[in-house]
């Protein structure tokens, strides 16, 4: 599975480099994101705590004006949390997803060296690994989340910029297959990256 993720990342970087060399309306970047993740539980599950997680990925901005961009990329996210089943059993799990977020980024004009932005969109995700008290067969393979974020980019000259932001990833779909247990996966991420 790591080979597949590496191959996807390598292909993404190759395409991004080609587009970046040809078009000033395109930027790509890399990011890492520490996260706090939790389950929103219902049915015979109750939320029993959050989990520190991590995400990393590649970003691509297709700028269709100075203040608007369509953003996408490939992210690998580690999320999960703790739940209590039937008010008795404490369960914890870590879910690993590959996500392909698609967001609209709204940007301010550059103020000094800083550009502020907000973004909103969706992130379809595919479960590639499950650890903990749930088995992979207990988890639905597909997830869909609303993505909302705020941040800033600090220009280093040309198209290169440092990026910092906060993103909320709100899962729409139940991740647990058990009919009497309902849980959606959510996280807040602190994004740190560089755009080229």
Image (cartoon, rainbow, N blue to C red):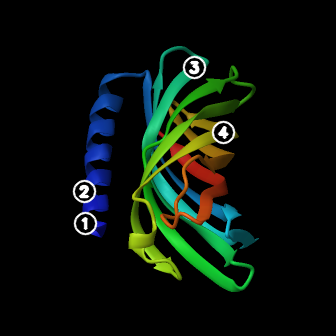
Q: Nearer the viewer, mark 1 or mark 4?
A: 4
Q: Secondary structure at mark 3?
A: strand
SS under mark 4: strand
Circles 1 and 2: CB distance less than 8 Å? yes
Indicate whether 162 appears above or below 27.
Answer: below
Mark closest to the chain's N terminus, 3 or 4:
3
Viewer-closest of 13 and 4? 4
Give the residue number, with chain letter if any, for mark 3: 68
Q: Position of residue 55 (x, y in %)?
A: 53, 60
Which comes before the other along the chain, label 3 or label 2? 2
What residue is pinned by disc 4? 148
Quarter placement of the N terminus? bottom left
Could you tell me which residue is drawn at 62 percent across and 52 percent down? 191
- Measure the alpha-carbon separation of dots 3 and 2: 30 Å
Q: Position of residue 87 (x, y in %)?
A: 75, 79
* Residue 3 picture location, percent across and down: 25, 66
């Amino acid at each position: 599975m790591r080979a597949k993720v590496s191959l996807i990342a390598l292909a993404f970087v190759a395409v991004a480099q080609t587009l970046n060399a040809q078009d000033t309306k395109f930027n790509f970047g890399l990011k890492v994101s520490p996260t706090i993740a939790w389950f929103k539980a219902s049915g015979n599950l109750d939320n029993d705590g959050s989990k520190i997680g991590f995400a990393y990925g590649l970003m691509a901005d297709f700028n269709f004006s100075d203040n608007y961009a369509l953003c996408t990329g490939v992210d690998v996210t580690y999320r999960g949390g703790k739940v209590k089943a039937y008010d008795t059993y404490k369960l914890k799990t870590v879910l690993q997803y590959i996500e392909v977020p698609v967001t609209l980024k709204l940007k301010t004009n550059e103020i000094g060296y800083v550009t502020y932005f907000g973004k909103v969109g969706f992130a379809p995700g595919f479960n590639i690994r499950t650890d903990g008290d749930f088995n992979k067969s207990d988890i639905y393979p597909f997830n869909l989340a609303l993505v909302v974020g705020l941040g800033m980019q600090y220009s280093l000259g040309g198209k290169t910029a440092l990026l910092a932001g906060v993103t909320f990833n709100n899962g729409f779909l139940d991740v647990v297959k058990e009919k009497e247990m309902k849980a959606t996966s959510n996280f807040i991420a602190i994004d740190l990256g560089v755009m080229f």
